[in-house]
Amino acid sequence: MDFESHVIAGFKNKFIGDDGAVLGQWVASKDLFCENTHFKRGWLSPKAIAYKSMIVNISDAIAMNARPKYVLLGLGLDRADVELVDGLRAGFKQACDEFGCEIVGGDTIKSSELNISISVLSRLENGAKALRRTGLKAGDLIAHTGELGSSLAGLKALLNGGKARSKSRFVRPVLRGDFIYKAARFLRCGMDISDGLSRDLGRLCAINRLGFKFKKAKSKQELSSGEEYEMLVAFSPRHLHKIARLAQKSRTKLSVFGIAKRGKYRHWGKGEHF
């Protein structure tokens, strides 16, 4: 059991266990984005820090097949710096404008480090059902969107004193709403990849009490690269062609790499960012 699971274990209820809590047609989700845990100040501009912090929260909404509507923002700032605040505000606004949501309140405090707390209220529209982590069945195909590994490559470059490429997923995640909103009705379950494919695949298998076997080998970098925010999804083989067509229409690369089976899957790799 990891630390997060240990904390959550004290608050067991029907709402906990997914990327967000489904409350009727609404989905509530929350994430923290903290200096020296998720980023170092010199790595990204204030605008880029704020943009990414918002995007990774919106990812939870998309992972549940919900559309983000309202945001509550918490900020811990180490100093009153107008340039810093203006940059952060520009990044928050850019992300909200791109995904059609708005900041409706929050709180700001003095903090020794730059810490960002974001809560997103999203809606399941037009009778859509939430895409949950549960529902996996033995024999289901397991796939991920996009290409994995760019985020880890960017992080390694930064840790070695270099710069991450502007297209690195560590700097600028790409979300897959165009695909998920169309394909969700054919998917058995899904979640976003925030802690690396191996670790998140382990979570998906554990919650469904199933194992997994690879149909296609994955490199160590693909398995361990965190903060990708691509989607990890599973579906019945009979829906493969439908889902592949929807992926093609939304210009989303879809890699089917495994199949669910009885047993257990043990993930590897650390859960910390750096």
Image: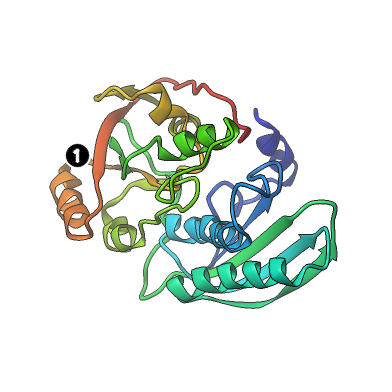
Measured as percent of width and height from the top left, residue 13 is found at 65, 50
Relative side of 142 to 229, left or right: left
Callout 1, which amino acid?
Pro
Q: Is residue 141 visible?
A: yes
Looking at the picture, the colour scheme in use is rainbow
Single out the residue that lies furthest toward the front: 162
The residue indicated by pointer 1 is 237
Measured as percent of width and height from the top left, residue 271 is found at 60, 31
Is the residue 43 above or below the residue 155 in the image? below
The C terminus lies in which quarter of the figure?
Answer: top right
Measured as percent of width and height from the top left, residue 244 is found at 17, 49
Q: Residue at x 51, y 59 (%)?
A: 55
| Figure quadrant of residue 4 | top right
Is the residue 52 above or below the residue 105 in the image? above
Relative side of 138 to 70, left or right: left
The N terminus lies in which quarter of the figure?
Answer: top right
Q: Residue at x 59, y 26 (%)?
A: 270
